[in-house]
Amino acid sequence: MSATNSYPSKVSIFEVGARDGLQNEKAVTTADKLTLIDQLGAAGLTRIEAGSFVSPKWVPQMADSGDIFRQLSKRPGVVYSALTPNLKGLELALDAGADEVAIFGAASQSFSQRNINCSIEESIERFIPVMEAAQAKQIPVRGYVSCVLGCPYEGEIQVEEVARVAEILYKMGCYEISLGDTIGVGTPLNARRMVEAVARRVPVEKLALHFHDTYGQALANILACLETGVSVIDSSVAGLGGCPYAKGASGNLATEDLVYMLHGMGIETGIDLNALITAGNNISQALGRVSGAKVARALTE
Ligand SMILES: CC(C)(COP(=O)([O-])OP(=O)([O-])OC[C@H]1O[C@@H](n2cnc3c(N)ncnc32)[C@H](O)[C@@H]1OP(=O)([O-])[O-])[C@@H](O)C(=O)NCCC(=O)NCCSC(=O)C[C@@](C)(O)CC(=O)[O-]
């Protein structure tokens, strides 16, 4: 039973630490990544983004994604997913054993250009064959829309553009659309208005929130949006990460802090917070720093 009837009784957490979290980190070994992924599964996470099949020239930190997918010990009931910007990425991901893939677009032309080297419209054209090939193999495809609450190059982004891109990805066949506040600039009321605008074009139960915590607003934004009916949230263990093509995108929302808030509200996640903290502390130690999760620091220092 949740605290009020307007909040969901359960939230599905989509863990992005091993991908979004580590795509900016140079000093992480494949073995450390595998340990992290295993410990996330042990903590009860059932949706784990484990890598990305992108150009190694663009994001060298993800160049070992094939090894990761080949070597990880799959836990029953856990879905291991990968980012795939194009057909080449999809082929590599499927060959390595990814259960699910994601295409990633943006609501900002400038961000699209810098992140995936093409316009929004060109990206949609590029995603069509990826979707068709994935569907032919019955591989679920998730869709990301970046810059939903602001762009590092263009500033404010119109919610109608966010809704338009989200609807295109949904109608193309993405089973879920993750709305990325890539640089964490959103605040609760505009976050909620954005979700409401998108929900007029994509069913709210098909939406996920991917809010970075750069300005310390992510939990407040999530709380405001949970009342709209969204019940899928992306987060990153130990607050690892950020997008290499978005200055200031460091500071993903820490999964530990999210789980603490949700459990405190009586919302189920299926996650063992102590085991999650251990996973976050271990990867933080491997990176030579303390965990970015406030809850982890409060409970272990
Ligand atoms: C999309 C491309 C590939 C276009 O990059 P391009 O240079 O336009 O592509 P291309 O087709 O001309 O290929 C150039 C070279 O890359 C290779 N290549 C091409 N595709 C692949 C592939 N899939 N895997 C491996 N290699 C690939 C290709 O074979 C070729 O190699 P060369 O002949 O020069 O040796 C490039 O821009 C890219 O890799 N971008 C990825 C950027 C990225 O990973 N950004 C971070 C993830 S997005 C994010 O973090 C946001 C998110 C999702 O979390 C949500 C949010 O917070 O907002």
Image (cartoon, rainbow, N blue to C red):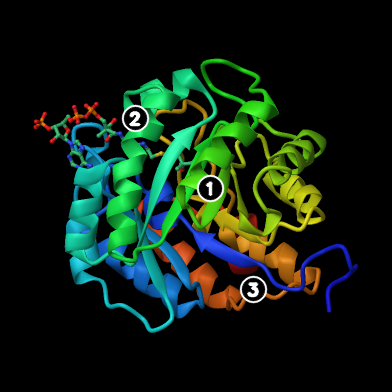
Residue occupying the far top of the picture: 154
Q: Amino acid at mark 3?
A: Thr
Question: What amino acid is labelled 2 in the image?
Answer: Ile
Q: Earlier in the sequence, mark 2 or mark 1?
A: 2
Q: Position of residue 300 (x, y in %)?
A: 58, 67
Label 3 crowd (10 A; few <14 / some 14-19 / many >=20): some
User: Measuring 19% from the left and 57% from the top, which residue is drawn there?
Assistant: 66
Name the quarter showing ligand 1.
top left
Residue on which disc 2 sits: 116
Give the residue pinned by disc 1.
170
Residue situated in front as seen by the camera: 107 or 209: 107
187 versus 271 height, above or below: above
Residue at (84%, 79%) from the top-left corner?
Answer: 1
C-alpha span from label 1 to label 3: 25 Å
Image coordinates for residue 65, horizontal then vertical, percent: 23, 55
Q: Secondary structure at mark 2?
A: helix
Asked where in the image residue 184 lies, by quadrant, the reply is: top right
Secondary structure, mark 3, is loop
Q: Nearer the viewer, residue 96 or 200?
A: 200
- Asked whether residue 298 appears in the rendered view, the answer is no
Q: Mark 2 and mark 1: span between their CA atoms?
A: 20 Å
Q: CA distance from mark 3 to mark 2?
A: 33 Å
Q: Is residue 13 above or below residue 196?
A: below
Badge 1 local density, few (<14 within 10 Å), some, or many (20+)? many
Nearer to us in this view, 202 or 293: 202
| Quarter containing the C terminus | bottom right
Residue named by callout 3: 269
Is 70 located above or below residue 83 in the figure? below
